[in-house]
Amino acid sequence: MLTVKEALGQGIRLLDEAAVPVPRLTAEVLLCHALHQERVYLYAHPEEPLSEIAWIHYGRYLHQRIGGMPTQYITKVQEFYGRPFHVSAAVLIPRPETEHVVEAALRYARQARLVADIGCGSGAIAVTLALEMPRAKVYGLDISGAAVQVARRNAEALGASVRFVESDLCAALADASLDLVASNPPYVPSSDAGALQVEVREHEPAVALYGGPTGNEIYARLIPEAARVLRPGGWLIMELGYRSLEPVRRMYDSCWRNVKSMDDLAGIPRVMIAQRTP
């Protein structure tokens, strides 16, 4: 029977040989998941023998990760804004960069009372805004019914009051009703599919990834729809794709003012911010 230390070492070697990034951390996460323990347990109990069931689960998780499945889909969890979100293959895995959308919303529209997260996926943005802006009424909309179910689960688990609706962009929303529209829309050009990591290309949902031939097609639909549903003075805050800044900036017309972008920590334009003209 392998000990915790031996199992961890074997996992690190297998992942390293398969060229999986950060093999030690990945092996630690997968072994902890198999053991239902925190990371500190691995180093506090290195000589503890693994049970047969833990070894079976650990071996399966290693096999899945070596085969390209993202670690988050194996463990079913990803942290976002300091909170654990359940994820499945029905939703995009929340990225740290998307936290900039939340930061921009809290900076420019903290007093918003009616908010919508368009293309909500796991509900990361909608749930976070509901918890950070407790006086706001928050909606989460997604074209995928399976994603809406995941988002509802996260709202319930985290104690957030969010109403989730299956909808194509803003179709389910009334005219001039919102103070804030936030979104991380699909923005990967479909022609770039072959260049994506296998973890992304083969496991994350295409409907949440690809924005059309140029990657900007969803922005071209969302901006005028947001102009319809936002009250005068309301804010539209969207995550930007790589190389999307200038094409998206040109989509704003006289319905908008205070159009600006915000960089991420790498200095890449990551968020586009605009205010509905009063």
Image: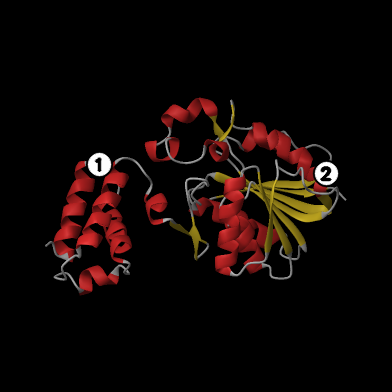
Q: Residue 85 or 115: which is nearer the viewer?
A: 85
Seen in the image, is 155 located left or right of residue 203?
A: right
- The answer to whether one can see residue 103 in this image is no
| Label 2 crowd (10 A; few <14 / some 14-19 / many >=20) | some
Q: Residue 269 or 35: which is nearer the viewer?
A: 35
Q: Is residue 67 above or below residue 258?
A: above
Q: CA distance from mark 1 to mark 2?
A: 48 Å
Q: Which mark is residue 39?
A: none
Q: How is the image coloured?
A: secondary structure
Q: Amino acid at mark 1?
A: Ala
Image coords of residue 76 (percent x, y)? 43, 55
Residue located at (66% from left, 35% from top):
218
- The answer to whether one can see residue 21 in this image is yes
Q: Residue furthest right?
A: 278
Q: Amino acid at mark 2?
A: Arg
Numbered disc 2: secondary structure: helix
Q: Residue furthest left?
A: 1
Query: Within the image, what quadrant is residue 179 found in?
Result: bottom right
Image coords of residue 112 (percent x, y)? 76, 62
Q: Which mark is residue 19?
A: 1
Q: Residue furthest front?
A: 53
Q: Is residue 17 above or below residue 134?
A: above
Image coords of residue 57 (percent x, y)? 27, 56
Of the residues under marks 1 and 2, which one precedes in the sequence? 1
Seen in the image, is 121 located left or right of residue 96?
A: right
Residue located at (72% from left, 40% from top):
222
Numbered disc 1: secondary structure: loop
Q: Is residue 233 above or below residue 245?
A: below
Q: Which residue is mark 2?
A: 228
Residue located at (50% from left, 65% from top):
83
| Label 1 crowd (10 A; few <14 / some 14-19 / many >=20) | few
